[in-house]
Amino acid sequence: MSFLELAPIFLINKKQVIKLKDFAKLLNYSDVYLLRIVKGLSKIGIKIGFKYKRNWYIVLPQKPIKSILNNENNLSNTIKQNTNTVTTPSGSEIDVNWAAALDNIPIAVRFVLEETLFNPTSIDKQLMLPISFGNEVSSTLGPKRLTSFKPINLGSFQSTSRYKYGYYIEYKESHMSTFDPGTSGLLNSTQLPAAFFEICRALDAAENARNGANPGLAPQRNISTTVSFDTGTIAVAATLPITVAIGANGKVDVTASDYLGAGFADFDLTANGDGQLTSDTLPEALMEMATTLSNAEKAVTPAENQPDNVQVVFDLEEGSATISANLPFTSAAASDGAVTVVAIDYLP
């Protein structure tokens, strides 16, 4: 059975405000990831939300996102026109600036915002915002968190030359990355996006194995890996616990913690020792691979051609690493009915 979920809108100084968790559902993003973005914007003096008591709130843009983006050629005037002072329930004043925020958020989130409609409706004299359609699920099993899907024509897949989902995907083989998986180990891919997807699938399976073997413990659901044949996209959302250490030379070392334990997340370093990765657990391997892929994106020149399909955000204060990704894939069916899914290399 399908249902429509509605979120309440609050009016503060005649400005529409919504809870961050509801805003995240509207965008189909993790609220943890969006909170990282909101805090990151705040650190550079850009406000789009505030915290009151135990909840974070987002001040909805007063103009359509597309209208704000269309005025980017005159950014200084756009920023001034879209700055609104809001007095929060705690009595403090903040200058909310969506134009500046759009200029500093990850491009993947910006794409989603551009296509999102903020159209409230009034129900029993209460403003409500439709945020999602869903399906009733079993009361004994909670679903993993979902992340957004980006159709290939909305992403930045530099090596893709032509695309029609369900018919063909053509890309330039000369524009492909290289990855050394080692020998006799978990990984077989020889390109960075495919290796990243292999590790995501392995960690997702390790979580399921750990949860199945420990029914009396709270389930661990730190990664969601979703393959959509409708959009031709692999969507990944992961939040990993991390530990931080400072070496004698002042170097800061960030390590992903093995939150599964008991051998569920082992990554065979001996077998992969002659390969590119140096991690010995799957959470470490995922963070290492995500960082490697993100750095490969940033190495693309010129800078305006850099894809941004993978984002890695470290929060040392909260001790977590947030990884978000949207990758194109190709699939094939074998004679025995097995379906293979391989992430396409989009790096030039």
Image (cartoon, helix red, strand yellow):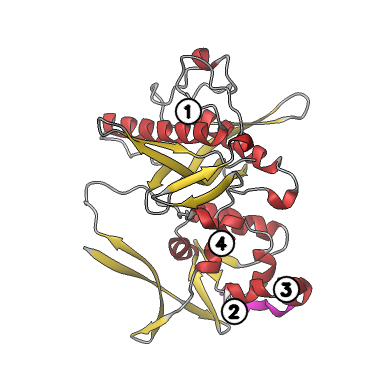
Q: Residue furthest bottom?
A: 125
Mark 3, secondary structure of its residue: helix
N-terminal label among 1 and 2: 2
What range of the chain is rendered magenta? 78-89
Q: CA distance from mark 3 to mark 2?
A: 12 Å
Q: CA distance from mark 1 to mark 2?
A: 44 Å
Residue at mark 2: 63
Task: Name the residue rendered at 74%, 49% in the picture.
Answer: 303
144 relative to 27 in the view: left or right: left
* Residue type of the residue flagged with mark 4: Phe
Query: What is the x, y in percent for residue 208?
Result: 33, 34
- Looking at the rendered image, the quarter that the N terminus falls into is bottom left
* Residue type of the residue flagged with mark 2: Lys
In which quadrant of the rendered view does residue 91 lie? bottom right
* Residue type of the residue flagged with mark 1: Leu
Residue at mark 3: 79
